[in-house]
Image: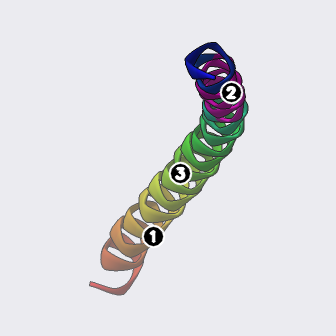
Amino acid sequence: MQGERLDELKRLVEKTETRLDEDMVLLTAVLKEADSFYNTLYHRLGHSQQLVMYNAEYLSYTVG
């Protein structure tokens, strides 16, 4: 009886470990995608900021 219960607990632990491993794989993929999105957004915003500063500098020379 105790042996059966122990085997059942071992199976539950293995299932839980498998689910945790699967969840970690999914979480890692989500974090990589979020990091990629952030880097792309940061790069684009930085590029846009440079363009705005360049245009402002150009306007300051031409207007004033």
Looking at the image, is 40 positioned above or below residue 20?
Answer: below
Q: Which residue lies furthest to the left in this view?
A: 64
Foreground residue, 44 or 30? 30
Residue nearest the observer in this picture, 60 or 1: 1
* Circle 3 residue: 38
Q: Point out residue 32 in the picture as x, y percentages from the top left corner.
A: 62, 35
- Extreme bottom residue here? 63
Q: Is residue 54 left or right of residue 31?
A: left
Residue found at x 54% / y 47%: 43
Q: Does the magenta stretch include residue 17?
A: yes
**Residue 58 lies in quadrant:** bottom left
In the image, the segment drawn in magenta is 7-19
Q: In this view, does 36 lie to the left or right of 54?
A: right
Task: Kindly identify which residue carries mark 2.
Answer: 8
Measured as percent of width and height from the top left, residue 56 is found at: 38, 74
Q: What element carries label 1?
A: helix
Q: Mark 2 Cα within 10 Å, few/some/many (few <14, many 20+)?
A: few
Taking 59 as reference, is 3 above or below it?
above
The reply, left or right, for residue 38 in relation to residue 49 is right
Label 1 neighbourhood size at 10 Å, few (<14), some (14-19), many (20+)? few
Majority SS type along the magenta span: helix
CA gap between label 3 and label 1 equals: 21 Å
The three-letter code of the residue at mark 3 reads Tyr
Residue 33 belongs to magenta span: no
**Quadrant of the rendered structure where residue 6 is?**
top right
Q: Earlier in the sequence, mark 2 or mark 3?
A: 2
* Tag 3–tag 1 contact (CB < 8 Å): no
> What amino acid is found at the position of numbered circle 2 in the picture?
Glu
Q: Where does label 1 land, which residue?
A: 52
Between circles 1 and 2, the one closer to the viewer is 2
Mark 2 → mark 3, Cα distance in angstroms: 44 Å
